[in-house]
Image (spheres, rainbow, N blue to C red):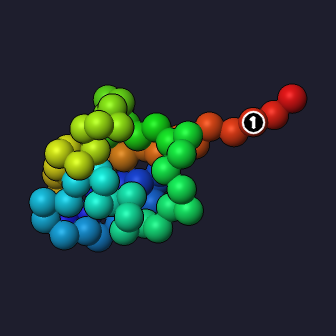
Amino acid sequence: MEVLVNNKLYAVQPETTVASLLQFIQLPTTKGIAVAVNRRVVPRPDWPATMLCPSDQVMIIQATQGG
């Protein structure tokens, strides 16, 4: 199935969770990361249980520091 992650299309296995998606796209760290699926924020404790569906739109936002 295909999901859109930050406007980039990824082919993932059926029954992919948010947590497994983050591993699949090989993020260097999940510190300071927020994830939304179809414009709904998914709390970090729910990542392992939140299943993705075909054509879901996932937004990954990473906090940055600055002055």
Q: Is residue 27 left or right of residue 9?
A: right
Visible residue check, residue 55? no
Q: Is residue 49 left or right of residue 3?
A: left
Q: What x and y, as percent, mark residue 62?
A: 58, 42
Residue name at image x 20 percent, y 44 percent: 50
Which quadrant would the C terminus be assigned to in this image? top right
Q: Amino acid at mark 1?
A: Gln
Residue name at image x 29 percent, y 37 percent: 45
Indicate whether 41 appears above or below 52.
above
Q: What x and y, as percent, mark residue 12?
A: 25, 68
Numbered disc 1: secondary structure = loop
Q: Which of the 4 quarters of the picture holds residue 44?
A: top left
Q: Is residue 66 left or right of residue 42?
A: right
Q: Which residue is mark 1?
A: 65
- 61 or 47: nearer the viewer: 47
Which quadrant would the N terminus be assigned to in this image? bottom left
Q: What x and y, as percent, mark residue 39?
A: 35, 31
Q: What x and y, as percent, mark residue 4?
A: 36, 55
Indicate whether 1 appears above or below 58.
below
